[in-house]
Image (cartoon, rainbow, N blue to C red):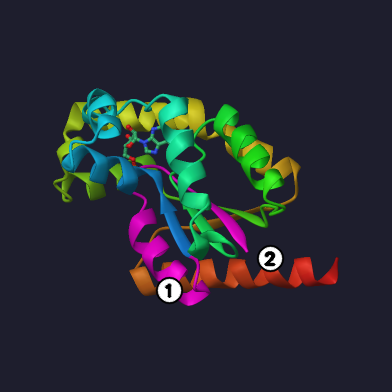
Amino acid sequence: MRIVFIGPPGAGKGTQAERLVKRLDAAHLSTGNMLRQAREQMTPVGRAAEPYLSSGRLVPDPIVLDLVAERLDRPDAAHSVLFDGFPRTLAQAESLDALLAARGLPIDMALELQVADEEVMRRLASRGRADDAPEVVSQRLRTYREETQPLLDYYRGRGVLESVDGCGPIDEVFARIWAAVDRRHSARAKL
Ligand code: AMP
């Protein structure tokens, strides 16, 4: 199963993604994690990405797409993959379609984690990551609204969107996510 996980920064996507990949035995493809790791290791990719990471803007597509293509070719990504933080733009979604088509792997589901803005600001204020500084947070939220939200229509139009309420205790949110995955799974089995 290929699942695209979409939600604003601070929606709790990372925590839920960790659980979901365990339950699904899927590869966790988080471009944010990959970029942060590259920055820590000071690789050429990390150095190129650094100004974008620290300002909350999107890292240019060629850098991100190279990382994704490489990751998709690792053996553990041959079957189930959870895309976390990618795609973030329509252009990236189209590139992902092409990458997956070349490998004969369709997207089965886009999973939206919905959290109100005020809740996002509250959660981010208590997290303390370097790019959680208030001005960077508002940039990341703006980028989410402008660039990433249009993806919801893109995937809705393809009939693969499932939206889940991301408010409440972690276990409850995960139960909703799992129910949505299950729904999608049954819908696909009927095709
Ligand atoms: P995340 O951990 O997914 O919130 O990502 C943290 C930061 O990494 C973002 O604010 C961007 O600067 C960068 N980033 C992560 N994923 C992408 C992507 N798909 N395209 C461009 N930039 C990304």
Residue found at x 21% / y 37%: 39
Q: Which mark is residue 22?
A: 1
Picture quarter containing residue 35?
top left
Is label 1 in a helix, a strand or a loop?
Answer: helix
Kind of residue indicated by mark 2: Arg
Please provide the residue range marked out in magenta. Answer: 1-26
Asked if residue 46 lies left or right of residue 70, the reply is: left
**Closer-to-camera residue (186/30):** 30
* Disc 1 residue crowd, few under 14, some 14–19, many 20+, Cα 10 Å: few
Q: Which mark is residue 184?
A: 2
- Real-space CA distance between mark 2 and mark 1, rounded to the nearest whole angstrom: 18 Å
Asked if residue 39 lies left or right of residue 7, the reply is: left
Q: Looking at this rendering, what residue extends furthest in the right direction?
A: 191
- Residue 176: x and y in percent read 51, 69
Q: Is mark 2 within 8 Å of ligand 1?
A: no
Circle nearer the N terminus (2, 1): 1
Asked if residue 49 lies left or right of residue 171, the reply is: left
Residue found at x 74% / y 41%: 157
Kind of residue indicated by mark 1: Lys
Is label 2 in a helix, a strand or a loop?
Answer: helix
Eyeballing the image, is 78 above or below 185? above
- Residue 27: x and y in percent read 47, 62
**Closer-to-camera residue (162/116):** 162
